[in-house]
């Protein structure tokens, strides 16, 4: 028998082929729509700064990378999927810490260091969830979703802090945290529902995460302007 040359990770994929995961592939358009939403929002609020433009670009790259993974289903495509996601997470965390702290580099560095240690610890214990070998995957109880625990925890912490400070972005961040929790549930249950729902539920993870990223982008653009703009006002 020839070795399996594609990653078989979700219900929808049943064989090799570019369009064997049509819903999982096409639903990545949600990230491109989120990027377009963020760009339009930034234009309405004085134009995107460097940080906003970087986050918007990363949002679009998440969609491109995930599309590549759900069409080619190879190791390099999986990296194209994972790298933009975590680059966005790290970048967003740094931007939101910096702006919520009023531009304090020392405080941003301390908090970012703590986040980095926690993230590294989670990756250490869930390393097998980040990348996948070709062929059918032995699915764990969380279907590799534990790798996203740091992102969920960060959103919850930011939501609590924003609410405690009565920050104008508190409802946006809280909504993003709730949406991410729901989307993580759909990602987790995908392999468990293959028998009853052949297409699975992973495409809902894409759609909801696109909505979440759009909300997070608007939270920064509308309620966390650059520090120099805050100082000027």
Image (cartoon, rainbow, N blue to C red):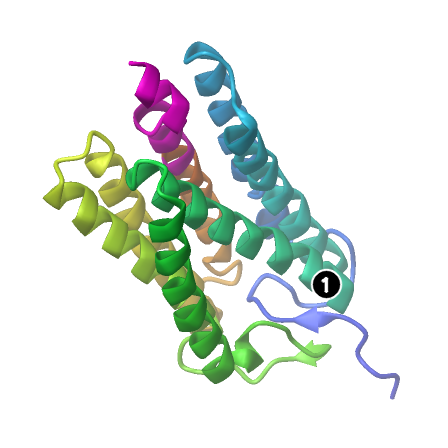
Q: In this view, does 213 lie to the left or right of 60?
A: left
Q: In this view, does 209 lie to the left or right of 163?
A: right
Q: Name the residue under label 1.
A: 73
Above or below for 79 versus 23: below
Q: In this view, does 108 lie to the left or right of 10?
A: left
Q: Residue at x 49, y 57 (%)?
A: 202
The residue nearer to you, when weighing 171 against 205, is: 171
Above or below for 119 versus 49: below
The residue nearer to you, when weighing 101 against 57, is: 101
Q: Residue furthest right?
A: 2
Give the tally of numbered discs: 1
Residue 195 on image: x %, y %: 47, 71
Q: Residue at x 31, y 52 (%)?
A: 155
Magenta region, main secondary structure:
helix
Circle 1 SS class:
loop
Query: In the rendered image, which quarter is residue 14 located in?
Result: bottom right
Residue 32 on image: x %, y %: 58, 33
Residue 217 magenta-highlighted: yes
Residue 63 magenta-highlighted: no
Q: Is residue 177 left or right of residue 171?
A: right
Q: Give the range drawn in magenta.
A: 216-233
Q: Can residue 143 be seen in this view?
A: no
Sort mark 1 into few (<14), some (14-19) or many (20+) by Cα contacts within 10 Å.
many
Residue 24 on image: x %, y %: 58, 51
């Amino acid at each position: 028998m020839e070795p399996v040359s594609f990653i078989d990770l979700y219900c929808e994929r049943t064989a090799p082929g570019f369009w064997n995961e049509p819903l999982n592939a096409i639903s990545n358009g949600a990230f491109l729509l989120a990027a377009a939403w963020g760009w339009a929002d930034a234009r309405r609020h004085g134009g995107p700064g460097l940080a906003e433009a970087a986050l918007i670009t990363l949002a679009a790259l998440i969609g491109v990378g995930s599309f590549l993974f759900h069409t080619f289903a190879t190791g390099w495509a999986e990296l194209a999927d994972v790298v933009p996601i975590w680059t966005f997470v790290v970048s967003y965390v740094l931007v939101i810490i910096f702006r919520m702290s009023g531009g304090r580099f020392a405080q941003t560095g301390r908090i970012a260091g703590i986040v980095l240690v926690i993230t590294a610890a989670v990756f250490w214990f869930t390393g097998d969830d980040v990348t996948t070998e070709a062929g059918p995957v032995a699915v764990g109880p969380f279907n590799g979703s534990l790798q996203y625990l740091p992102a969920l925890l960060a959103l919850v912490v930011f939501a609590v802090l924003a609410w405690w400070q009565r920050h104008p972005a508190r409802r946006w961040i809280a909504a993003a945290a709730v949406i991410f929790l729901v989307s993580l549930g759909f990602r987790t249950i995908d392999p468990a529902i293959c028998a009853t729902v052949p297409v699975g539920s992973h495409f809902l993870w894409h759609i909801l995460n696109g909505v979440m990223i759009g909300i997070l982008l608007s939270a920064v653009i509308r309620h966390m302007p650059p520090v120099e703009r805050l100082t000027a006002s």
